[in-house]
Amino acid sequence: MNHDIEKALDNLEKRAQDIQHYMNIMSKVKTVNVADDQDFQREFDFFYKVRRNAEWRKVFFEIFERKKKKNCSYKEIITELYEGTGQVEASFASKMLASIDENMPIWDSKVLDRIGIKSSNK
């Protein structure tokens, strides 16, 4: 088989797995307690590449669980994450909000790069 075709098929297979992870997150977010559900947390961490310590993750998922129960804003989430972790987490705040409300955007370095805005951590 042609190397380009093999590469394209491998890429499509990987994208299908990514979509499945995303669908799992979106289907569970409203039905499980995200502060306690280890399967949900593992899938979220894997899909969004969360590389933070256990203490940070505990704070993040506790905020996530509280915020999903009411209409919340990006400002509320990013402020509470800062108060709980001492870090400005613009990307993870947007990922949390987009998981709660699928109509909200995700703001991360890839998105910023594509729209021509320089990320401060580059």
Image (spheres, rainbow, N blue to C red):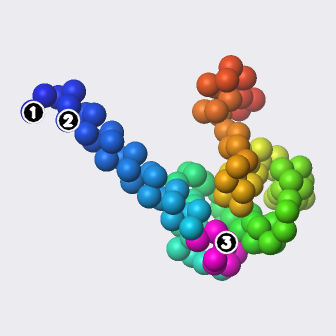
Instruction: Judge whether 59 appears above or below 113 on screen.
Output: below
Residue 43 can be seen, yes or no: no
Tell me the residue at 77%/44% (across/down). Answer: 90
Q: What residue range appears in magenta?
A: 28-35
Of labels 3 and 2, earlier in sequence is: 2
Point out residue 74 in the picture as x, y percentages from the top left corner. Answer: 83, 50
Tell me the residue at 25%/39% (across/down). Answer: 9
Count of picture labels? 3
Q: Which mark is residue 30?
A: 3
Disc 2 residue type (three-letter): Glu
Tell me the residue at 53%/74% (across/down). Answer: 39
Question: In which quadrant is the N terminus drawn?
Answer: top left
Closer mark to the observer between disc 3 and disc 2: 3
Q: Is residue 73 left or right of residue 26?
A: right
Residue annotated with mark 1: 1
Disc 3 residue type (three-letter): Lys
Residue 30 within the magenta-colored segment of the rendering? yes
Residue 96 within the magenta-colored segment of the rendering? no
Point out residue 122 in the picture as x, y percentages from the top left corner. Answer: 67, 27
